[in-house]
Amino acid sequence: MTRLLTAALAVLCLAAPAFGQADRPSLYITPTPDGFDSYLAAAMVKKEVPVTVLDHQHGARYVLKTTQVEIKRVSGKAKLMNCVFASCEGNEDEGSTSVQLVEAGTIKWSYSVNKEGGAKARQSMAEAIAKHLKKEFFRG
């Protein structure tokens, strides 16, 4: 009897996380030509946004529409001038993007982000989006 009870308890403990997944709304992230959607999916997991990320739009409660990351490059001449007059501040390339969270055709939340570092800032931008989505929309 004790073995049966122990086994049943173990099954319930292992299955508990799966039950919580059913309560989470589903999210589809629109693909981008530059692959920024992959960074966003990883950031949703890392920042523990309470959604289940899907690889297809069918059946998703929310769609996160994202724009391709734009990179503003600082020219060599501008870098030199910044170092001469501004202690080399502003020498990093800058990346920017924006997202819209849509439910049934209605924009529920939107966010724009700019980060220094250009192409290297993709992870940082994705994590900022996930952090603000969790904090501002899902109140996490």
Image (cartoon, rainbow, N blue to C red):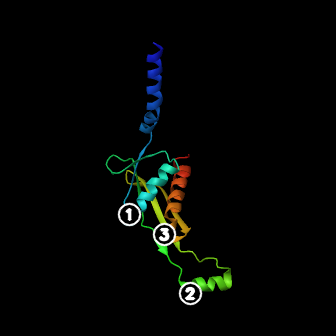
> Of label 3 and label 1, which has the lower sequence position?
1
Image x and y of residue 53, in percent: 41, 48
Tell me: residue 127, above or below residue 83: above
Tag 1: amino acid:
Thr
Q: How crowded is mark 1: few (under 14 residues within 10 Å), some or many (20 or more)?
A: some
Quadrant (top left/top right/bottom left/bottom right) for the C terminus: top right
Name the front one of labels 3 and 1.
3
At label 2, which amino acid type do we have? Answer: Lys
In this rendering, would 33 be left or right of 51?
left
Real-space Cα separation, disc 3 to disc 2, in angstroms? 20 Å
Q: Does residue 88 appear anywhere in the picture?
A: yes
Estimate the spatial distance between the alpha carbons at disc 3 and disc 1, rounded to whole Å: 14 Å
Which residue is drawn at the image coordinates 54% and 58% (left, top)?
A: 128
User: Considering the numbered disc 3 on the image, is that residue within a helix, a strand or a loop?
Assistant: helix
Kindly tell me whether residue 107 is visible in this rendering.
Answer: no
Q: Residue 9 carries which label?
A: none
Determine which residue is flagged by label 3: 119
Residue corresponding to mark 1: 32
Residue found farthest to the front: 3
Q: Earlier in the sequence, mark 3 or mark 2?
A: 2
Q: Name the residue under label 2.
A: 77
Image coordinates for residue 52, horizontal then vertical, percent: 42, 45
Q: How would you rate the neighbour count of disc 2 (Cα within 10 Å): few for under 14, some for 14-19, many for 20 or more?
A: few
